[in-house]
Amino acid sequence: MSKFISISLARRGVSCVAELLEKDAPRTCAAVWDALPLGGDAQHAKYARNEVYTMVPRFGEEIGFENTTVTPIPGDVVYFSFSGGMLDQSFKADQGIDHLPGVVDLAIFYGRNNLLLNGDVGWVPGNVYATIVEGLDAMAEACHDVWRSGSVGERLVYSRLTERSDVR
């Protein structure tokens, strides 16, 4: 039986449903599922294009790569693991994660033409572990508003979904 998660932009009151891709990314799915609920300050990507993400402290064992991409498509839910030295010091301080040895970046992609290329480190492959199956249009509109209006005060929250009717 498939597992589903709810992904919400809390302040904007918008949620979507994503189905875990357990056959394609079993380690990532298991680690994220076991760690839920997760969430933090929402950020909009500068370089990747149509991405909203949050950084959380590392959880579980290091997963490694599985079902990776550098060209996520709309609806992809992606896991990234960054060591402490991979992120810019001023960014880490701004995010309040400068004291951590590494972080997990949980991201959703809501539009086309994304490219995971960072000018500081090069290609940044991520593990696609879920796909949004309900509410992508409303979430895309809210994510675009994060880009246009700003992310201050917004939280991106991931939680287990026991019933699909739990989504707004």
Image (cartoon, grey):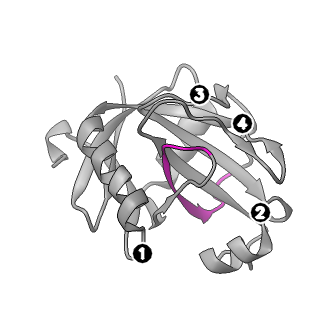
Q: Nearer the viewer, mark 1 or mark 3?
A: 1
- In three-dimensional space, the C-alpha distance between marks 1 and 2, rounded to whole angstroms, equals 21 Å
Q: Name the residue beneath numbered marker 2.
A: 87
Q: Residue at x 41, y 68 (%)?
A: 150
Mark 1 or mark 3: which comes first in sequence? 3
The mark nearer the N terminus, 3 or 2, is 3
Q: In terms of depth relative to the viewer, which is nearer, 152 or 13?
A: 152
- Counting residues from the N terminus, which is met first, the one under dot 1 or under dot 4? 4
Picture quadrant where residue 86 is located: bottom right
Compared with residue 2, is residue 159 higher up or lower down, i.e. above or below?
below
Instruction: Tell me residue 100's x, y (percent).
Output: 73, 73
Which stretch appears magenta? 48-60
Location of residue 122 in the rendering, given as x and y in whole percent from the top left corner: 82, 43
* Foreground label between 4 and 3: 4
In the rendered image, which residue does mark 1 sit on?
A: 152
Looking at marks 2 and 4 on the same chain, the residue that comes earlier in the sequence is marked by 2
Is 94 magenta? The answer is no
Q: CA distance from mark 1 to mark 4?
A: 27 Å
In the rendered image, residue 93, in percent from the top left (x then y), is placed at 69, 80
The quarter of the displayed image where residue 162 is located: top left
Q: Which residue is mark 4?
A: 125
Secondary structure under the numbered disc 2 in the rendered image? loop
> Mark 1 Cα within 10 Å, few/some/many (few <14, many 20+)?
few
Find the distance from the CA under tag 2 to the CA under tag 4.
15 Å
> On screen, 120 above or below 57?
above
Q: Nearer the viewer, mark 1 or mark 4?
A: 1
Foreground mark, 1 or 2?
A: 1
Classify 10 Å Cα crowding around label 3: few (below 14), some (14-19), many (20 and above): some
Looking at marks 1 and 2 on the same chain, the residue that comes earlier in the sequence is marked by 2
* Quadrant in the picture for the N terminus: top left
Does residue 149 appear to the left or right of 165 in the view shown?
right
